[in-house]
Amino acid sequence: MKIAVTGASGFIGRHVLQELFRQDIKIVAVVKPSNEGPFLPGVDVVCLDIRDAPANAYELLSQPDALIHLAWGGLPNYRSPHHFEQELPTNYQFLKSLVAGGLKNLVVAGTCFEYGMQSGPLNEVGAVLPSNPYGFAKDCLRQQLEYLKASQQFNLTWARLFYLYGEGQAENCLFPLLRKAVARGDESFQMSGGEQLRDYLRVETVARYLVALTLKQQNCGVINLCSGQPISIRKLVEGWIMENAWQMALDLGRYPYPDYEPMAFWGDPSKLKALLEIS
């Protein structure tokens, strides 16, 4: 089986490539011309700007059996109109051209921000009420692809990601910021009050789930990629400090809570567990 991955040089993409490589699956890494590697041995690298993808993009990708679509620009600025003004039409036209070319299996990374400001446990059959441009644009892309399925035959899995951490994460994210504070020798780590509840997974786990869903080659629809176990940001950070034996106190309340997400929400992983037979 041959699987192509867009956004292959990104945080999630590199871990997806590692998981595909571990399973000895033929890989096509799709990257911008400015991000040519290095990559794992045996990986076919295709330099392609999806904003200007040619009509024969599916052929240029060596006609993969499936595509894991992780590419998306403009992050982490969730409030920018760029998401629906540029990313939405660009991504839809690119994916539409691949389907028209013959792509039969598509797995796309969605976001928990599609749920908007809803609190508590969130499942795939509940309402989507995006409250920022990023979540709105992602949900619009999902709906466009669902409409496309009415005229084009392909399998669609919409993997709604919650919160991730791990190696290679952007430097302005929580875990890298904590690690940098430790490296500098800071006595304390400045953060919010830390009482907000979130749903976190290691990026390696998310990569494993994405690959497993792709290998099914099924029309899975929307699936939460989450733990189902809410944890406060304070306990999460304290756990990282303990796990790594770091000497660091927490300076709580230095920053306000984000106003684009509720104080307490997490995913329901029931559908994910059933599909992948996870206990």
Image (tube, rainbow, N blue to C red):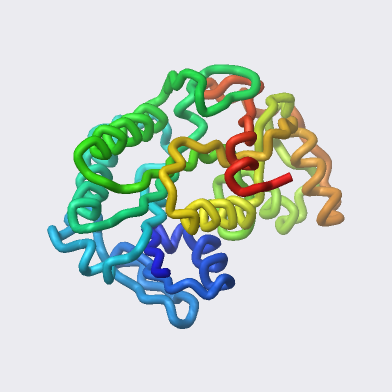
Above or below: residue 173 compared with residue 182: above
Q: Locate residue 214 relative to residue 247 in the image: left or right.
A: left
Q: Locate residue 142 relative to residue 256 in the image: left or right.
A: left
To which quarter of the image does residue 255 belong? top right
Total number of numbered discs in the rendering: 0
Above or below: residue 35 compared with residue 243: below
x then y, percent, for residue 228: 68, 34
Q: Residue at x 82, y 46 (%)?
A: 248
Q: Locate residue 7 relative to residue 182 in the image: left or right.
A: left
Q: Residue at x 50, y 66 (%)?
A: 17
Work out which quarter of the rendered image holds the C terminus and state it. top right
Of residue 54 and residue 274, the one placed in the foreground of this image is: 274
Q: Residue at x 31, y 54 (%)?
A: 104
Q: Please indicate, yes or no, whether residue 253 appears anywhere in the rendered image.
A: no
x then y, percent, for residue 100: 18, 52
Of residue 81 and residue 113, the one placed in the foreground of this image is: 113
Of residue 240 and residue 104, the one placed in the foreground of this image is: 104
Q: Please indicate, yes or no, whether residue 105 appears anywhere in the rendered image.
A: yes
Work out which quarter of the rendered image holds the N terminus and state it. bottom left
Q: In the orientation shown, which residue stands out farthest toward the bottom?
A: 41
Q: Residue at x 38, y 67 (%)?
A: 29
Above or below: residue 104 compared with residue 162: below
x then y, percent, for residue 109: 44, 45
x then y, percent, for residue 19: 56, 65
Q: In the orientation shown, which residue stands out farthest toward the left?
A: 55
Above or below: residue 176 compared with residue 236: below
To which quarter of the image does residue 144 belong? top left
